[in-house]
Amino acid sequence: MDPQKILILDFGGQYNQLIARRVRECSVYCEVKPYDMSIEAIRSFDPIGIIFTGGPNSVYAPGSPQLDPEIFALGLPILGICYGCQLISHSLGGKVTAAQEDSAREYGRTETFFDTSCRLFKGLPEESVTWMSHGDYMARVPEGFALVARSANCPTVGICDENRRFYGVQFHPEVNHTRFGREMLRNFLYEICGAKGGWTMADYKNAAVRAVREKVGDGKVLLALSGGVDSSVAAALLAEAVGSQLTCVFVDHGLMRKDEGDEVEQAFSRWSINFVRVNAGERFLEKLAGVTEPEHKRKIIGQEFIRVFEEEAKKLGAVDYLAQGTIYPDVIESGKGDAAVIKSHHNVGGLPDYVDFKEIIEPLRMLFKDEVRQLGRELGLPEYLVMRQPFPGPGLGIRVIGEVTKEKLDILREADFIFRDEVASAGLTEGMSQYFAALTNMRSVGVMGDGRTYDYAIALRSVTTSDFMTADWTRIPYELLDKISSRIVNQVRGVNRVLYDITSKPPATVEFE
Ligand code: XMP
């Protein structure tokens, strides 16, 4: 049975993904679609309610995104947020204008007053803080609408027509700064749209497994497994759905962390799929010999990955489906909710050109990252795989600065393992978004016992970030750094110095190369 669905029509606002996340957090399934989705497509999507997002335009500006007025005749509840609210007003005969200097232009935290007899605000205080971001103002609201929220500057912050179940707010209920925003969305879903809730990842798993079975039939599926969270969860889902019809090609480029290749292989031993592990470490090292320029190294690793995968795929012959671990943010960010996006990620980008297949399947393309992790757990993948921190496709190849050799990789793997192990024992992983060791290409003089050493310096890096676009270095306690440093120099041969990287991004990046 299909879950109840909310349709979110995207008018280009910056918080659109957040609206989708909030709805799903209320245990109701939703999808974000382009605002110009046809009425016919909306009918066949069969939502229980529609949300119009915010957007950067003015509804009265020529060429601004508009709606097919028929949408208001579908009999479905509608919630308009910011631009979406103005659009309801504009489309149904109200008047929206640019706010003048001293009137209703509002940005940021705003004290707001609510009429709590409106179902959208049911059970909430009559006064609280909302987050506004609008330069336009509803000078006149359409017939049939009541004013249900206001601020000191603006009498038309919230509007509703309870009979037709149309609601609009000028503020953003989806952001944390709106004190009772989640409750308002919950009211829209449960009080107004009649959602029953109960959408969980366990349901999603069962539905997705059934859908994959239906689609694939007795066809053959091929997946390039990188060992990362997304491709691992996609593989587990396909394994559960079509078992032996699935072939996973796991290219171990020899640039993985300690024991990582074995852990990935082990995690998939519970399914009877065709698991091909290609130990291509030596081959990658040969290609990387003598190469020191970072971009050149990245290109070689990316190209070689594709080449190895292509060779394995050729051995298998034609397949029906090529599977990819594309996730929802990649799809939404493309700006075209319906278009397939093939990740430009170095180790899957370009694969379709090389492999003979009929169609791509992307079983995770409707899930956010935390939902992907939850699905992985439902499928029985171990916690260490599901919670794995981001790891770059080129692996340790870009954490060994300069030329990559087996000796350097072995040193780095040990040092990196000690770092992660000590952090885990200290129970400090919270707040450390990504942490790892890198092998600097620098050797320096030290003294051990009575002798002189001339060994490598290991750099430790830990960053705290929410999006990896910018990052701060993590303030790791000195005691922990001390423990890690002594263990590394004592246990890893070839290292006599440990450095801690205290640069943020920008100006540095997270990775060293
Ligand atoms: P930078 O070094 O650009 O890293 O600040 C930001 C985040 O991206 C990861 N990263 C990669 N991930 N393929 C990936 O899948 C890559 O080639 C790649 N390079 C960097 C990095 O680990 C960090 O999380």
Image (spheres, rainbow, N blue to C red):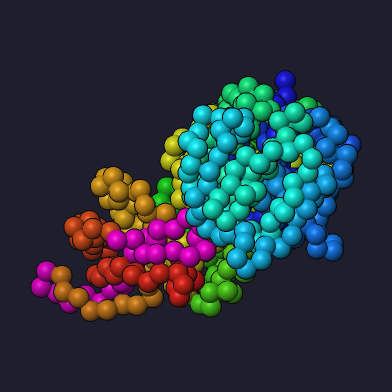
Q: Left of 172 or right of it: where is 211?
A: right
User: In terms of image quadrants, where is residue 280?
Assistant: bottom right
Residue sitting nearer the eye, 153 or 236: 153
Residue sitting nearer the eye, 231 or 184: 184
Instruction: Residue at 55%, 39% (x, y): give it.
Output: 114
Instruction: Residue at 74%, 60% (x, y): give it.
Output: 97
Q: Is residue 57 above or below residue 220?
A: below
Image quadrant holding the N terminus, namely: top right
Give percent across and percent down for residue 61. Answer: 80, 63
Instruction: Residue at 62%, 68% (x, y): give it.
Output: 101
Q: Is residue 163 above or below residue 252?
A: above
Q: Left of 126 or right of it: where is 223?
A: right
Give percent across and percent down for residue 278. Answer: 59, 49
Residue sitting nearer the eye, 60 or 334: 60
Give percent across and percent down for residue 110. Answer: 51, 53
In reply to whether residue 450 is colored magenta, the answer given is yes
Instruction: Residue at 49%, 50% (x, y): give it.
Output: 111
Give percent across and percent down for residue 164. Answer: 77, 31
Residue 31 seen by the camera = no
Q: Left of 303 or right of it: where is 456?
A: left
Residue 202 seen by the camera = yes
Residue sitting nearer the eye, 51 or 72: 72
In reply to whether residue 382 is colored magenta, the answer given is no
Q: What residue span does the magenta drawing correspond to?
A: 449-475
Q: Left of 481 or right of it: where is 254?
A: right
Q: Is residue 504 above or below residue 80?
A: below
